Image (cartoon, grey):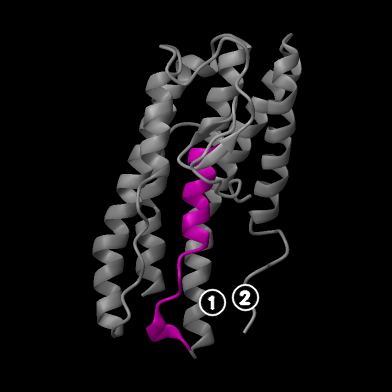
Amino acid sequence: MPRRIALVSGMLLLACGGRPPPTPPPPLEGDDESPGEVHIAGIALPRMPVEVAPDDPELEPGWAATRAALTMATPTPPAGDEWEVETWADGALASWMRRRAEAVAEAQTALEPARHAEPEYGVVASMLLGLAYSRFALDLHGMPVPRVFEGDRERTDAFRQAMRDAARPLWLRALDAFGSCARTAAEGPAHSLAHWRERCDAEIRSVSAMLPDAPDDGDED
């Protein structure tokens, strides 16, 4: 069955397409926002650059598309027999992976104009793109192991490896987007971009720790 998931994961590259643009994403915050704070899908962002707002024409389409990708519910494996898990992998999981990849690709397309606009918009757009990719990767990385595999270390490891393999290209795309955010913020003239550079640098460190060659953090018995 993990082999089926590995084959399904190939759809991510087809749906996302293009050159990799780019931790787990930051912890979810409450819905209440302090003055000046902005959230997207529960994720707190640095204070917005001067004269930049989520509903600006330059940013609004990408912001909406990113929110749609970030708020897509993640399926969980059924608790039944192996044949039910196989049906889930071929059906619900495959469909979710395809739709989520398409949603992230739509967010990237919508964000591209802002990424290449003024630095104030570029840092925000690249941050959003990085979050879209990294949250998708995190959901794959954290997918619960089907209960039917409990007690079978080989199948458990194979399932986790399939999820890590599917997440890896997404982590790399997140790295690229967060890197673009950090570079744009460093080169921009506005002092208000300093917090965005710090945040993007922190995201880069977090994503790097999640790549397969980083120390394993979740395979304990």
User: Amino acid under label 1?
Assistant: Asp
Against 122, residue 37 (above or below) is below
Q: Which is nearer the N-term, disc 2 or disc 1?
A: 1
**Residue 157 disc label:** 1
3D distance between C-alphas at marks 2 and 1:
8 Å
Please indicate whether residue 83 sits to the left or right of residue 40 in the image. left
Please indicate whether residue 73 sits to the left or right of residue 212 in the image. left
Mark in front: 2 vs 1: 2
Residue under numbered circle 2: 219
Image quadrant in which the N terminus is located:
bottom left
Picture coordinates of residue 60, whole percent (x, y): 40, 20
Residue that appears at 36% across and 67% down: 76
Please indicate whether residue 54 sits to the left or right of residue 178 in the image. left
Picture coordinates of residue 103, whole percent (x, y): 35, 38
Looking at the image, which residue sits at the far bottom? 151
Q: Nearer the viewer, residue 151 or 63?
A: 63
Q: Nearer the viewer, residue 72 or 90?
A: 72
Q: Are marks 2 and 1 in contact (CB under 8 Å)?
A: yes
Task: Give the magenta part as a residue range.
Answer: 131-150
